[in-house]
Image (cartoon, grey):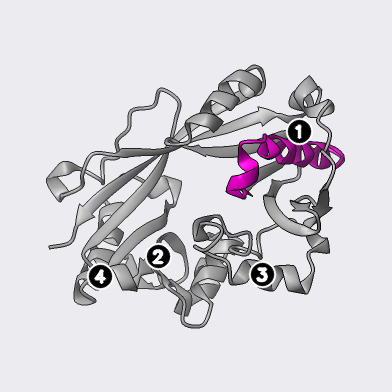
């Protein structure tokens, strides 16, 4: 089989069926910081690699590497990675990282991310949990949570223009930019996402993405520092679960906890453990581009 490498965005008709809608969106935006190489025959896609670049830091990250299952493990992964590394070196990028998800008890290794090729050992970034929403929704801490005076929940599709502008200009000022509720807005389910106001001012949010007919991803949560110690984050979690469980056919919720977030890890072990049906971990591999 004669397989060629090409710019996937320029041959999108060939690769669209293999890519998620989000990946298509990322590589087709004007002045995008994402690029993708595709591997395929003249008519058929057999794989692609999607990369995010961070020009100001000369860093880059592999977002996805997908290979047709019949051809996995024969060396296409290395070929696509080599093409990416060559392009990045030409642009004077210094590092490339590859974040991989592993099942519980699965060895933390990939044959194409070997130390012999310059890849470092995988570093744990976060834990990924999938839980039974029906069970969680009946837990007392969900059913009995009540808002104190001065606080109010609102559906994210009710966000005002002024609040949107306030959030857009507040990144790395009153909240970390990585927790912005405005990123990946095309993936958000605004009806299921929840905001929290105190005396009319927005102080937190729980952003939800619907990933399947019966599953949601609780993507991003933020509470202003002055309210976090008061347990308002738990209120947001409970309201997010209550809203989601009202959707017909909804069964599962997925959420991610960073390894440094000891408070949330303890909360998960204490309150979610009986309802967790799947545990995974996200590890990051790093390579210095000499």
Q: CA distance from mark 4 to mark 3?
A: 36 Å
Mark nearest the camera among 1 and 3 is: 3
100 left or right of 81 in image: right
236 left or right of 229 in image: right
Q: Residues within 10 Å of mark 3 (few under 14, many from 20)?
A: few
Q: Which residue is mark 2?
A: 52
Percent position (x, y) of residue 73? Answer: 31, 44
Q: Are the residues tagged 4 and 3 within 8 Å (C-beta)?
A: no
Pointer 4 or 2: first along the chain: 2
Mark nearest the camera among 2 and 3 is: 3
Percent position (x, y) of residue 246? Answer: 87, 39
Q: Nearer the viewer, residue 211 or 79?
A: 211
Residue at the location (65% across, 64% down)?
185
Q: Are the residues tagged 4 and 2 within 8 Å (C-beta)?
A: no
The question of residue 245 being in magenta is answered with yes
96 left or right of 269 in image: left
Percent position (x, y) of residue 259? Answer: 43, 35
The question of residue 141 being in magenta is answered with no
Residue at the location (59% across, 26% down)?
267
Q: Secondary structure at mark 1?
A: loop
Q: Which residue is mark 4?
A: 88
Residue at the location (17% across, 61% down)?
289
Pointer 4 or 1: first along the chain: 4
Q: Which residue is mark 3?
A: 166
Q: Which mark is residue 251?
A: 1
Pointer 2 or 1: first along the chain: 2
Q: CA distance from mark 2 to mark 1?
A: 32 Å
Q: CA distance from mark 4 to mark 1?
A: 42 Å
């Amino acid at each position: 089989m004669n397989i060629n490498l090409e710019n996937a965005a320029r041959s999108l008709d060939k690769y669209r069926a293999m890519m998620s809608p989000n990946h298509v969106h990322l590589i087709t935006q004007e002045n995008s910081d994402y690029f993708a190489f595709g591997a395929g025959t003249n008519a058929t896609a057999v794989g692609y690699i999607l990369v995010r670049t961070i020009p100001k830091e000369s860093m880059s990250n592999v977002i996805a590497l997908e290979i047709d299952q019949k051809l996995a493990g024969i060396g296409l992964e290395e070929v696509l990675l080599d093409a990416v590394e060559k392009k990045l070196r030409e642009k004077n990028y210094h590092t490339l990282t590859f974040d991989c998800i592993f099942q519980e008890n699965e060895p933390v290794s990939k044959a194409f991310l070997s130390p012999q090729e310059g890849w470092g050992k995988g570093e744990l970034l976060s834990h990924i949990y999938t839980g039974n929403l029906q069970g969680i929704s009946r837990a007392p801490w969900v059913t009995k949570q009540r808002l104190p005076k001065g606080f109010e929940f609102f559906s994210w599709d009710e966000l005002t223009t002024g609040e949107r502008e306030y959030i857009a200009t507040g990144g790395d000022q009153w909240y970390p930019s990585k927790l912005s509720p405005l990123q990946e807005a095309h993936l958000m389910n605004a009806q299921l996402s929840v905001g929290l106001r105190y005396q009319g001012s927005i102080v937190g949010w729980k952003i939800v993405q619907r990933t399947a007919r019966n599953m949601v991803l609780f993507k991003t949560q933020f509470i202003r520092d002055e309210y976090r110690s008061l347990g308002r984050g738990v209120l947001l979690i409970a309201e997010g679960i209550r809203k989601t469980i009202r959707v017909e056919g909804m069964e599962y919720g997925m959420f991610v906890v960073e390894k440094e977030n000891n408070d949330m890890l303890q909360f998960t072990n204490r309150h979610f453990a009986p309802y967790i049906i799947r545990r995974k971990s996200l590890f990051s591999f790093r390579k210095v581009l000499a």
